[in-house]
Amino acid sequence: MSTLASVLAVVALSHGGGGDDDRARVDATCGGSVRARLELRAEDGEIETRFDLDHAPRGSAWRITLTQEGRVDWRGRATARRGSFRIRRTVRDLSGADRIGIRASGPRGLSCRAYATLPGD
């Protein structure tokens, strides 16, 4: 039987004085002992997106989908060679608040989902 779990934990936002220091972080628990974190950082018209996945089965293959405002921005694959991996992507900082989401689908039905919103200027 496959295990499918996506639990969104805590969203932490911090704002800098000039608007170029906006950050968001979302921690997620993803079935078994797998853990994931989505971090966003807005600077100079771009949003740096970092997704870390830890405690995955060694050598497991994952499909990754990154969305911005509900639209697919990027799809890719990653392998948890030592039980973890990191994905870094940069997306355009749209006017207003930006909602970024990531979905990682792994072996045996393991799945992680995380969404974070950066406030607009």
Image (spheres, helix red, strand yellow):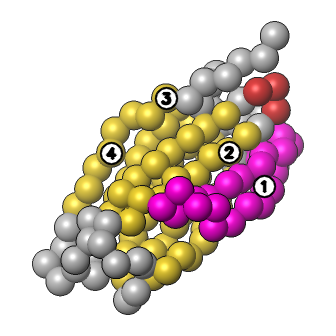
Question: CB of mark 2 within 8 Å of CB of mark 3?
Answer: no
Residue neighbourhood size for the residue with mark 1, other residues' Cα within 10 Å, grouped as few (<14), some (14–19), many (≥20): some
Q: Which residues are magenta?
A: 59-83
Question: CB of mark 3 within 8 Å of CB of mark 1?
Answer: no
Residue 30 horizontal/vertical position (percent): 59, 31
Looking at the rendered image, the quarter that the C terminus falls into is: bottom left
Q: Is residue 22 visible?
A: no
Q: CA distance from mark 4 to mark 3?
A: 12 Å
Q: Amino acid at mark 1?
A: Ala
Where residue 95 sits, quadrant-wise, is bottom left
* 40 with respect to 107 (left or right): left
User: Residue 7's mark?
Assistant: 3
Residue at the spot 27% in from the left edge and 76% down from the top edge = 21
Local secondary structure at mark 3: strand
Disc 1: which residue: 78
Residue neighbourhood size for the residue with mark 2, other residues' Cα within 10 Å, grouped as few (<14), some (14–19), many (≥20): many
**In this picture, is 28 found above or below 77?**
above
